[in-house]
Image: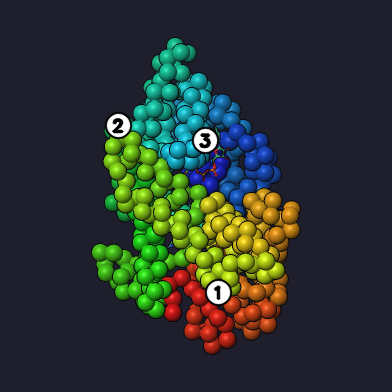
Amino acid sequence: MNILVVGAGYVGLVTAACLANKTNRVVCVDTDPKKLAKLASGQIPIYEPGLKEIVDAAVSNKYLTFELGIKAGLTKVESESTEPTLVFIAVGTPQGEDGSADLRYVLAAAREIGQQLTQPAIVINKSTVPVGTAESVKGEVAWQLFQRKCFIEFDVASNPEFLKEGAAIEDFFKPDRIVIGTDNENTKANMLKLYRPFVDDEKRLLTVGVKEAELIKYASNAMLATRISFMNEIANICDRYGIDVEDVRQGVGMDSRIGPAFLKAGCGYGGSCFPKDVQALVRIAQSVGVEPLVLNGVESRNKKQKQYLFEHIVAKMGKDLTGRKIAVWGLAFKPETDDMREASSIDLIRALCHAGAQVVAHDPVAKEVAEQVFADLIRNGRLTLVDHAMAATQDADALALVTEWAEYKTADLDALKQSLKAAIVFDGRNHLNPVVMKQHGFHYAGVGRV
Ligand SMILES: NC(=O)c1ccc[n+]([C@@H]2O[C@H](COP(=O)([O-])OP(=O)(O)OC[C@H]3O[C@@H](n4cnc5c(N)ncnc54)[C@H](O)[C@@H]3O)[C@@H](O)[C@H]2O)c1
Ligand SMILES: O=c1ccn([C@@H]2O[C@H](COP(=O)(O)OP(=O)(O)O[C@H]3O[C@H](CO)[C@@H](O)[C@H](O)[C@H]3O)[C@@H](O)[C@H]2O)c(=O)[nH]1
């Protein structure tokens, strides 16, 4: 099939490469010339395991090409096809000032599609957007066509994306489900044809109405965030009673009605999706007069949980951290990504520096991103970023683990103990074994662990 993907970010680039990998002809466009220059020279602008391999394969087989902007992209796709073009919108929907999803990029893309389209098309919204956005996209495209006095057949469908950063390729090739939101039989047939090669069982292809698909995305993210905030609250109760939250997690997760996934307590969820999507759903609820009692709680618990490590460090070491050196392991919002959007490390490091501490931090891949996020703290000498985990802990008064990278789990504990000034470890992801840590003579504090 002939496909245009608008946006070469996490979702757009992964979608374009994976669809091209199944012998679809895909043109991926972006408005950022720097991103395109990187892609043109064979570099991948983001850190995502396995992405380079599939992009390289699709480019060398000539199934995937890149263009600057929608106009160039549509011209290319349409010149190669007589079938309806599938146009995926995969641009950002950042959080607006009031917490709602900012749709300016989606609507700008729709406008330009309407201005440039010359052949029938199915516009498919992959960005995470509030209920009713497909209608707005339809209106925008139709209005542009009307102004051009063009009568080109088109439809707008919703096809939310559920990939996780760090496992994006696997998620795309082996999805739990693919949600196709459409009320049009022709669109449905085209989407089913496109996605059949990605599922082992036809039951994984869920076709629903457009609005239902739009809400499924927010409801899914909010449900996952709810599980995490819920377990974080349970972990706080565990702290008070001296109960191990890992045992509680196991016992709760063994109930087949609950299941074990996404129940890990820690120092709060981050990333480009959960925080903004929970807030956006709060606004969606309020906009139709529903008081989002549960969602507000999920959000409040997460904000509080991001202070967990700092509060425990202060409880142990005192409020004034002047002259103290704290090592931080992990900056990305989770392992296998260099993404630091809404990462818990940001709250911790800023709080530590504010309390007077000197911070030395390490992350296996997010150092470059961190240099930008913490430019002020680096400039005024409060924060140093280092290339090796053990370089961070050298002479530190304590270590705080914020991201559960595999290399931290296998760290040489004797070397770690020797490098630290005081053998104190705060583990914000319950990544290390408390028994082993204590055997090695560490003062070890996890989240809700004994
Ligand atoms: N990142 C994830 O893990 C993930 C997963 C599922 C869904 N989503 C959702 O998917 C959407 C995209 O997220 P992302 O993380 O890929 O964003 P991103 O910021 O990484 O990428 C968006 C890209 O779109 C480009 N763009 C903006 N306007 C454009 C236009 N008119 N024409 C061409 N390109 C344009 C930007 O330059 C940018 O490169 C969001 O709604 C997000 O909530 C993200
Ligand atoms: O048991 C858990 C699982 C995750 N997290 C935290 O939750 C955040 C998000 O993790 P994850 O969901 O793995 O990462 P994302 O890449 O943000 O993926 C989420 O957001 C995407 C964007 O919408 C969706 O597509 C995915 O399905 C959804 O999992 C991270 O800070 C994790 O540390 C926990 O604290 N405990």
Which quarter shows the C terminus?
A: bottom left
Side of 415 where 341 appears, left or right: left
Separation (CA) of disc 1 from disc 3: 50 Å
Q: Please name the residue that numbered disc 2 is placed on.
A: 184
The type of residue carrying mark 2 is Asn
In the image, residue 314 sits, relative to residue 331, either above or below, namely below
Residue 138: x %, y % from top left: 39, 26
In the image, residue 309 sits, relative to residue 221, either above or below, namely below
Sequence-wise first label, 1 or 3: 3
Separation (CA) of disc 2 from disc 1: 61 Å
Q: Are marks 1 and 3 in contact (CB under 8 Å)?
A: no
Disc 3 CB within 8 Å of nearest ligand 1 atom? yes
Q: Residue at x 38, y 32 (%)?
A: 133
Residue 448: x %, y % from top left: 42, 72
Choose mark 2 or mark 1, whichever is in front: 1
The type of residue carrying mark 1 is Lys
Q: Residue at x 50, y 45 (%)?
A: 11
Sequence-wise first label, 3 or 2: 3
The type of residue carrying mark 3 is Val
Q: Residue at x 55, y 43 (%)?
A: 9
The dot on residue 6 is: 3
Residue 373: x %, y % from top left: 64, 51
Q: Please name the residue that numbered disc 1 is placed on.
A: 316
Which of 331/304 is in front? 304
What secondary structure is marked by label 2? Answer: loop
Residue 263 visible (yes or no)? no
Mark 3 closeness class: few <14, some 14–19, many ≥20 residues within 10 Å: many
Which of 29/100 is in front? 100
Q: Residue furthest top?
A: 149
What secondary structure is marked by label 3? Answer: strand
In the image, residue 139 sits, relative to residue 13, either above or below, namely above
